[in-house]
Image: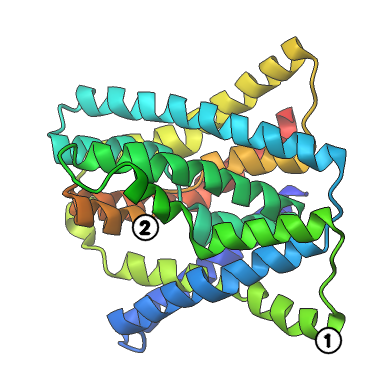
Amino acid sequence: MGFTTIINQIVFLGVLALCGIIAYRFKILQNSAKEVIEKLIFFVTLPLLIVTKLASLNLTSEILRNGAMVILGTYLILFIQLFIGKLTAKLFKLKKPQAAVHELHTAFGNIVFLGFPLLDALFPGGEAILYAALYQLAINTVMWTYGVFKLNPSTKEKGLKNLKKLINPNIIALSLGLLMMAFSIRIPEIINIPLNGLGGITLYLAIIYIGVLLAQTKIKNTLRSINVYVLSFNKMFLLPVVFIFLFKTIFNVLNIEMNTVAFSSLILESAMPCMAILVLVAKRFGGDDELAMKNVFISHILSLISLPFILLMLQLFS
């Protein structure tokens, strides 16, 4: 993919986000509409995007191998990110509610509302969606166990009760899509066209939703938080570059290969700006949701620079 294409894609996303900001500022979209958009994406358009893309793929040994490597790679990435997040939280001497959010946001990116649609736009064909879904699966296992415990060690909602949250529409869509891939089940064209079209609007809805989130943030207080900038730099600039060279070294030592789509998906998902959903999770389990919102705001603004940078690094070194 040419660098011009990358810049065009990021500008495209920026325009969509601006539309969301303007719509909120002029009260065209309000909180009730934001909630509707969120549910529409999570329960309708994104599951359809996953199913229709995966159903068009053939399950090959290469996809299976790369998929397994993505899952293992995700857990390695999460371990490193959480370690760095814990370390920087201590350096800034953050209190427990802030430290928990800082650590988790260093690891958990906006893979659903930005990662999925962006990867689908950058790598059309469906394979990138599969790897993104596997990345999300690994993220969820950590977020609803370690993440919840980190936010509130005394919470009663842990163990098997939190594991139930792993069963969500997107994981169900992933499972269904994998079954259709395995048994070469194709969706009839007359049904696939409208479903594929509906799944295709995920990008537009997701970025408008992010625009509304950005419009709700109190900018003045956010700009003064140095730890937020450090988090964004570590998560979106420094660590993704480290991961590129780390995995390349591992692949060379073990003499294994990972195709370009899988590797790019893994690195780009690790470089996503801070997870928007963590704002709600932090509020529910006693974390600092105000800091979480600051992280989301700054990281999404900086992602207009960081994502083209990481894509360029992938082109140069992958």
Q: Quadrant of residue 117?
A: bottom right
Q: CA distance from mark 2 to mark 1?
A: 35 Å
**Left/right of residue 224 with respect to residue 179 in the rendered view:** left
* Residue for badge 2: 277
Rate crowding at label 2 as few (under 14), some (14 to 19) or many (20 or more) other CA atoms within 10 Å. Answer: some
Q: Residue at x 29, y 79 (%)?
A: 31
Q: Is residue 121 visible?
A: no
Task: Pick the residue in front: 157 or 313.
Answer: 157
Q: Which mark is residue 190?
A: 1
Q: Which mark is residue 298?
A: none
Q: Nearer the viewer, residue 37 or 305?
A: 37
Q: Position of residue 219 (x, y in %)?
A: 24, 59
| Dot 1 amino acid type | Ile
Which is nearer the N-term, disc 2 or disc 1? 1
Is 59 drawn above or below residue 65 in the view shown? below
Give the number of callouts: 2
Q: Is 32 rendered above or below residue 295?
A: below
Density class for disc 1 (Cα within 10 Å; few <14, some 14-19, many ≥20) is: few
Quarter the C terminus occupies: top right
Q: Is residue 71 visible?
A: yes
Which amino acid is tagged 2? Ile
Pick the front one: 279 or 47: 47
Q: Is residue 109 above or below residue 277?
A: above
